[in-house]
Amino acid sequence: MKKTILIVEDEPKNLKLVKDLMVIFEYNTMEARTGAEAIKILENNYKTIDLVLMDIQMPVMDGLTAVQILKENEQIKHIPIIALTALAMKDDKEKFINAGFDDYIKKPIDIREFKKVVSDYLERRISI
Ligand code: MN
């Protein structure tokens, strides 16, 4: 069965790029444009979403706030959430992990690295 990935990204061009890649990799996709929208979608679809790719800077609610709320939700917290970010200094990585992200991927996206990180997390996931 195809895995389902929730893409959380406010920038239409970035959203399209990530979505196109996920389709090429043969994953199903869902979309959200703010952290608040992502929370709503995950609350209603936590049984079908296998992985979340989340931008940091978004209107209404940013990724750092959203991930903290999601990782406190018993039904959602096992779903890996990977930050998509242009910031990629060593300190930033710690900041993302401390906030609750499982990992991060740098923007602009390196397609090969992106594919590897996503497939590693999907294979690692324990089915419940
Ligand atoms: Mn953004």
Image (spheres, rainbow, N blue to C red):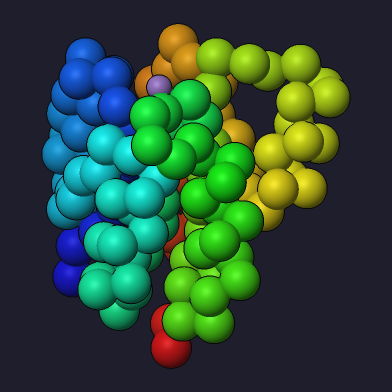
- Whether residue 93 sits left or right of residue 113 in the image: it is right
- In front of the other: 75 or 122: 75
Q: Would residue 49 be seen by someone viewing this image from the given angle?
A: no
Q: Quadrant of residue 118?
A: top left
Against 68, is 31 above or below?
above
Outermost residue toward the front in this view: 60
Number of numbered discs on residues: 0
Outermost residue toward the bottom in this view: 128
- Whether residue 75 sits left or right of residue 89 in the image: it is left
Image location (x, y in percent) of residue 18: 28, 28
| Image-quarter location of ligand 1 | top left
- In front of the other: 107 or 60: 60
Image location (x, y in percent) of residue 104: 59, 35
Image location (x, y in percent) of residue 14: 28, 19
Image location (x, y in percent) of residue 89: 76, 16
Q: Quadrant of residue 109?
A: top left
Against 10, is 79 above or below?
below
Q: The N terminus appears in which quarter of the rendering?
A: bottom left
Going 20% across and 20% down the picture, which residue do you hit?
Answer: 12
Against 125, is 29 above or below?
above
Going 30% across and 27% down the picture, which residue do you hit?
Answer: 10
Q: Would residue 98 be seen by someone viewing this image from the given angle?
A: yes
Going 19% across and 62% down the picture, which residue do you hit?
Answer: 2
Going 19% across and 50% down the picture, which residue do you hit?
Answer: 30
Q: The C terminus appears in which quarter of the rendering?
A: bottom left
